[in-house]
Image: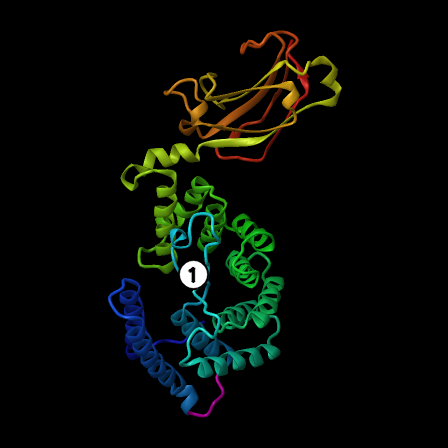
Amino acid sequence: MTTALTPELQQLRQQIEQIDQVHAQGLVSDALHQETRQRLERELVERLLAAPAARSGVRPGLPVWGGIVAFMVAVGGAGYWWAGSPAAVGAGAPVPMAAAPASAPHALGNEQMLAMVETLAERLKAKPDDAEGWGMLARSYATLGRAAEALPAYERALKLAPKDAQLMADYADALALQQGRQLTGAPMDWVRKALAADPKQPKALLLAGTEAFNRKDFAQAIKFWEPVVQGGPPDNALVQQARAGLEDARQALGVAPAAAGNEVLASLARLGGTVRLAPALAAQAKPEDTVFIFARPAQGARMPLALLQRRVKDLPLRFELDDSMAMSPQARLSGAREVIVSARISRSGQAQPQPGDLEGVSAPVAVGSMDLQLEIASVVK
């Protein structure tokens, strides 16, 4: 539940958003932006605190305070959105997820915001099982730059709502900020949990794309960021940052935006995993025997879509298949949704199977799978 906003408050909020937009476009100076935003924030806070419930002397209940705090958090830019595109910090460098400065996010209005947040925290003592309230409190502390209080609040909220993908993504973001804006480790664990709970969760997709971009896996970053751009309103801050990231990732891949469609799809058409030889068959293979690893459509034609050739001495082998390994321009991984991956040890060195060859065959897997485990454990009859 949130507080209803009067037309005057709506107008103030729109003015704050507008001054942020023109500043982001470089149309006003930092000084003018700060001065104007602070004036609007002061007026907004004063009007919020002068709401009927406050004027009557009645202490607002949790839903009302929660609505006020949520509104202020939204205006203040809660959530650690990027301060720039990946290119702004250099390919492979840690991408900032937050526009949060070292000090409190807004010099003006922080005392009023803090008073609201502390009131919300006090109210939660009477309602300790309110997951939404704890999540709101965590985001509010994060907006105020109080990570030491935000993280325990997130943890409390997640215990009460363990399947909330938005909470997981927000917690991952806060953890990353705490460890110097690095997503590796615990933050990415929570991003994966969020995407497992909701594969379309925008913030989790944004963070996953950031982590991939930092590893210079630009194709994977595109895969995460495209659904954010396609699924959200164009003026949403999250969508705008994902769009900026897409442009940087495509540029890093050498793909022009106008030609990005098919070429990016091709760059995303990959399969990967590990091939091992079963110990029981090890004596039946020689180190120099040829190993063919290939993918074919799960249905229809059996022509391989990608083929990789190695030696038994290379096993166990971490492999990756992509369109560059296609045997025909008309038959490529990017044209399939599901494939069957096979690994075969050929004594003769021929690609066609021969009796006595050793092989392992996967179940149908989706193109894009990168953790396939394939064991060569049977003999071709």
Residue located at (48% from left, 84% from top): 60
At 58% from the left and 77% from the top, the residue drawn is 124
Q: Is residue 243 visible?
A: yes
Query: Residue 59 lies in magenta, yes or no?
Result: yes
Determine whether 101 is above or below 263 in the image. below
State the colouring used for the structure image.
rainbow
Residue 318 coordinates in the image, percent (x, y): 59, 30
Residue, x 38% and y 42% (percent of image)?
A: 252
At 54% across and 54% down in the image, what residue appears? 183
Which SS class for mark 1?
A: loop
Quarter that holds the N terminus: bottom left
**Is 224 situated above or below 119?**
above
Residue 63 among those drawn in magenta? no
Return the residue found at the far left. 27
- Can you see residue 2? no
The one of 94 and 70 positioned closer to us in this rendering: 94
| Residues drawn in magenta | 56-60
Q: Position of residue 57 (x, y in %)?
A: 46, 92
